[in-house]
Image (spheres, rainbow, N blue to C red):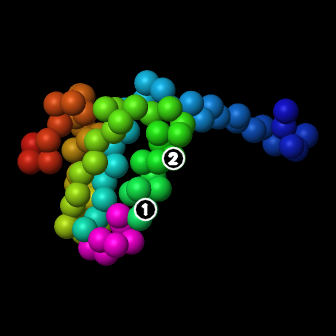
C-alpha cells in the first residue's frame, strides 16, 4: 500500500537468502571500519544471507575501493574473482 496517492512506491523484499554479497572495506580508519563491517555482516545474516555467500576484501584506502568494485562488476562470478585479477 502506497503512502502517497500520486507517487508510485516500490516495496522491496529484504530477504537475503540466495544473494551473493561483496563487501569492500578500507583499512584507512580500521577501528571505525571494523565496527561498520561487524554491523553490516550481522545485518546481512539477520536478513538471511549465508556466510558462504559473502566476500570481504580489504583495500588500503578509498581510491582502491573503486577499482575493486569495478573488477567485481566485470567478473562473471564472484567465486572466481581475486583482488589481484585484472
Q: Quadrant of residue 1?
A: top right
**Residue at image point 54% right, 37% down:** 47
Up-down: is 51 above or below 34?
above
Look at the image and tell me in which quarter the C terminus lies. Answer: top left
Percent position of residue 53, x then y = 34, 32
Q: Quadrant of residue 26?
A: bottom left
Q: Secondary structure at mark 1?
A: helix
Q: Which residue is mark 1?
A: 36
Q: What range is drawn magenta here?
A: 28-34
Q: Let me know if residue 8 appears in the view.
A: yes
Q: Let me know if residue 69 appears in the view.
A: no
Q: Is residue 71 left or right of residue 15?
A: left
Q: Is residue 80 left or right of residue 1?
A: left
Percent position of residue 59, x then y = 21, 61
Q: Main secondary structure of the magenta part?
A: helix
Q: Earlier in the sequence, mark 1 or mark 2?
A: 1
Percent position of residue 43, x then y = 51, 46
User: Neighbour class for label 1 at 10 Å: few (<14), some, many (≥20)?
Assistant: few
Up-down: is 7 above or below 61?
above
Up-down: is 79 above or below 71?
above
Q: Is residue 80 left or right of residue 41?
A: left
Q: Secondary structure at mark 2?
A: helix
Relative depth, front residue between 38 and 17: 38
Q: CA distance from mark 1 to mark 2?
A: 11 Å
Q: Which residue is mark 2?
A: 43
Residue 54 lies within the magenta run: no
Amino acid at each position: 500500500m502506497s503512502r502517497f496517492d500520486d507517487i508510485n512506491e516500490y516495496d522491496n523484499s529484504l530477504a537475503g537468502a540466495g544473494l551473493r554479497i561483496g563487501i569492500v572495506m578500507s583499512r584507512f580508519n580500521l577501528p571505525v571500519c571494523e565496527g561498520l563491517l561487524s554491523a553490516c555482516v550481522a545485518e546481512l545474516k539477520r536478513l538471511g544471507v549465508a556466510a558462504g555467500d559473502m566476500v570481504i576484501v580489504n583495500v588500503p584506502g578509498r581510491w582502491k575501493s573503486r577499482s575493486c568494485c569495478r573488477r567485481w562488476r566485470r567478473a562473471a562470478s564472484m567465486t572466481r574473482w581475486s583482488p589481484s585479477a585484472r
